[in-house]
Amino acid sequence: ALGDRPEHRRAVERVRGSTPERVVHGAQFVTEIQGGSDVPANDMTAVPDGEIYRLHGQKWFCSNINADYFVVTARPQGAPEGGRGVALFLVPAYPEGGGGAEAPRPRNGYTIDRLKDKLGTRELATAEVTFDGAQAVPIGPLDRGIPNLVEHVLVPSRFACVIAAAAFTRRAERVVSAYADFRTAFGSTLIDFPLVRVAVDGIGTARRRATAAVFELLRLWEAARGGTEVEALDFRVMLSLCKPVLTQAATRGLHESMMLLGGNGIEERFSPLPRLYRDSVIMETWEGPHNVLLTQALRDLARFEVDPGAFVDRVAGDAGTRLGAELGELLSRASEPETTVPFAGFAERLVHAFADRVLAEIG
C-alpha cells in the first residue's frame, strides 16, 4: 500500500462505495505547460503545513476535472531538481473529500482557468487549473513520486488506451463490413470490388492483432506482478510499444472505414465512425504520444542491457531470429538520437509479430 492515512482510507472507501446514483471517481493531473510529457520538469510546489501539504502552481492538462479526487505531481519545498524531487499527492476536490453534488462548498484551493477545446473525448472535460493552497497528502515516499505514478497511474491508463484501440478497431470493422456487404454501386456489391475487399480485410487484420495484443499484455502484466525482473521488463517494453503502434493503427483503420462509406462516412448522424476517429486521436496522445514512448522503450532496452535475441524470442516466437538481429543492430547504436527513427519501424513489426504469435497459438 502507498498510504494508510485517514485521507487515503476515506478516498478508497468512497470510490469503492460508488453507486449508480452517486459515482465517486478520480483523475490524475501531471502535465505542466513548460514540460508536457517531461514530468521531471514539474515545478508546482508542495509546501508543508503540519501533517499535510499545500499545493501552489498550475497544471496545464487536467482531464476529468469534475472528479472527486485528484492524483497530482508536485515538488516538495526544498526537494532536488529533476525526477527524484517530484512527489505524488492525493488532493480531494473539496475539503474533507466531499463532492459538490452532496454539499455545495468552495473547492479545495484550486480554480479552473479554462476548459480545453479538444478534438475528441469532448464529453470528458479537460481544464487548465491553478492550485493556490490546496490541501494534499503524499502518496508513497516523496522521492518515489514518478516511479509510483508510472506503476500505479500511467501503466493502467496506457493499457486502457490499448483496450480502446482494440474496441475502436472492432467497431470500425463491424460498421464497414455490414455496409460493404449490402451497399451496391455500379452494379456490384461494394465488397466485390478488390480495393474495398482488401481495405476491409486490412481492418480485420488490425482488429485481430489489437485484440490478441490486449490479452497477451494482460498475461504479461499479471506475470510481472511479483515475477522476475525479466518478466517486468518484458511487460514494460511491450506496453510502451503496443500503445503507440495499436492506437495509431486504430486511427488509420477508422479513417479508412470512413472513406469506404464515402459521403456517409463523414456524416455524424450516419455512424459513430467520425466520433470514434476523433476519440482515437486522443488515445494516441494520452499518457505519452508515440515519440515519447518509443524513445523510452529504446532507452529501457539499452539501459537494462537486454539480450535482443532472447527478448524477441520471448515476445515474438518464430520471428525472433530476424527481428532479434535487427534489434541487436539498433541497440548497438542506441546512444545515437537518430536511432529512434528506424526503431519506430521496428516497433511496428515487433508488435505485429507479438500479436501474430498469439493468434497462431490459439488457432
Image: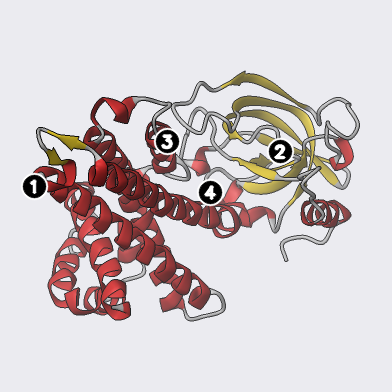
Q: How far apart are marks 2 and 3 (CA)?
A: 26 Å
Crowd band around label 2 with a 10 angstrom C-alpha radius: few (<14), some (14–19), many (20+): some
Q: Distance between the residues labelled 1 and 2?
A: 49 Å
- Is residue 178 rendered to the left or right of residue 83? left
Crowd band around label 3 with a 10 angstrom C-alpha radius: few (<14), some (14–19), many (20+): some
Front in this rendered view, residue 48 or 23:
23
Q: Distance between the residues labelled 4 and 1?
A: 53 Å
Q: How far apart are marks 3 and 1 (CA)?
A: 25 Å
Instruction: Tell me the number on the disc at residue 83.
Output: 4
Residue 24 visible somewhere in the drawing: yes
Crowd band around label 1 with a 10 angstrom C-alpha radius: few (<14), some (14–19), many (20+): few
Q: Mark 3 points at which residue?
A: 272
> The residue under label 2 is which amino acid type?
Ala
Residue 295 visible somewhere in the drawing: no
Q: Mark 2 points at which residue?
A: 67
> The residue under label 1 is which amino acid type?
Pro
Q: Eyeballing the image, is 85 above or below 212?
A: above
Q: Quadrant of residue 127?
A: top right
Q: Nearer the viewer, mark 2 or mark 4?
A: 2
Name the element at disc 3.
loop
